[in-house]
Amino acid sequence: MLRPPAGALDGVRVLDLTRILAGPACTMLLGDMGADVIKVEPPGKGDDTRAWGPPFLGGESAYFLGTNRNKRSMTLDTSSGAGKEVLGALIRKCDVVVENFKTGTLAKWGFTDAWREQHAPRAVHCSITGYGTTGPKAHLPGYDFILQAESGLMSICGAADGEPMKYGVAIVDLVTGLLAGNAILAALQARHRTGRGQRVEVSLYDSALFMLANVASNYLSSGKDARRFGNGHPNIVPYTTFAAKDGMIAIAVGNDAQFAKFAGTMDRAQWSADARFARNQDRVANRDELEALIGAILKTDAVDAWIAKLTAVGIPCGRVNSVAQALNDPHTAARGMVQTMAHAVAGEIRTVAPGLRMDGTPTSIRRSPPTLGEQTEEILREELGYATERVEQLRNDGVI
């Protein structure tokens, strides 16, 4: 098989000391962009998500398979002296080290800032924590669900008169992973100028607050706390979901000119001159009244019929799909967003493709998610130059 064109990070070696989602999502993204990612996992157990199921494919959890492609796996007992020796050798060989240990863990093992300055000065060290390295909660572990609650994200999700709700996926973990990837890329760029790596830090807590976006700005500007709007928008109306005759439709009217077209399509052109609805700020003030009027009209026809009418006049809208519908949508296929890869034990598996495109240095899926320790000997021999006898000794001692 022909090797795909070199990715943007071809030649960059990443040491992945993370588990669960934020760190693995970050390192998978780097791997998708061409980096050689070495994932270090505890012997016999591996990343916690290897056990998170069902579903399982050939004994491999779908959760793990979804965030660990384009990586090589090696097992290593980092609590042992020999394991720390191997870890130090790996750090020296890598351009990027990503870890999500509790604050101070690497330093406790001897890999202090001074050690890195002496032995791996060009390495970018990315630390992913729950709450950062300062502040009264710095010592606590971070969990996406808890951070959605503490950050206020949960308080703005759910029905207006219902309970706070978490997002359907671990969105704080995912955004933290994306921010970590951005920080790493920036540090690698800076290294071209300075010749040195640096320590970068991201935390679930900071990421969750960052995700409040305009909602945070609304509060900081007005002093008025945020509330839930169901599927609605705090600043724009109509911008929510409605029930049509045969399903749900999402409609996003972004400005007054769009609203005039929308009103005409509803056969209610007079709305655009109505003092209650003419300007967006008026529509926000009269949200419930307007949405009730719109909802009654939309129930008279099918989703596809409304999409055709609204799209024809430039109104953003779409069917509220299930996950299955979205992944089987013709546009998903046209974009190549579901790809197939061969796995050592799970057989042929499908995965969501990288979510970015680069025409000169394209992303690619070069490796399926590894089985636990699949490349341990390969990495020790080829990357660290260990002799067969030493590898066997490490195995006999339970280090790998």
Image (cartoon, rainbow, N blue to C red):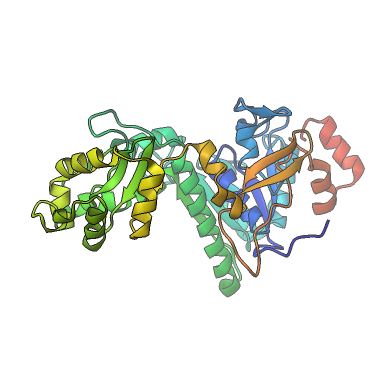
Q: Seen from this angle, which residue lies furthest left?
A: 275
In the image, 148 versus 316, the foreground residue is 316
Q: Is residue 7 left or right of residue 130?
A: right
From the viewer's perspective, tell me whether residue 168 is left or right of residue 290.
right
Which residue: 63% across, 36% down? 64
Q: Quadrant of residue 295?
A: top left
Residue 212 visible to an observer of this rendering: no
Q: Quadrant of the N terminus?
A: bottom right
Observer-nearest of 226 and 372: 226
Which residue reaches farthest top? 54
Give percent across and percent down for residue 255: 24, 60
Q: Give the vertical position of 307 relative to 229 (above or below).
A: below
Left or right of 246 in this view: 16 = right
Residue at 33% from the left image edge and 40% from the top image edge? 301
Residue 175 position, x and y percent, is 46, 48
Front-lying residue, 384 or 39? 39
Please, which residue is most extreme toward the bottom here?
Answer: 193
**Image quarter in which the C terminus is found:** top right
Q: Position of residue 169 (x, y in %)?
A: 47, 37
The reply, left or right, for residue 72 in relation to residue 307 is right
Q: Position of residue 65 (x, y in %)?
A: 65, 38
- Residue 341 vertical position relative to residue 143 in the rendered view, above or below: below
Depth check, front residue: 304 or 281: 304
Residue 38 is at least partly visible in this image? yes
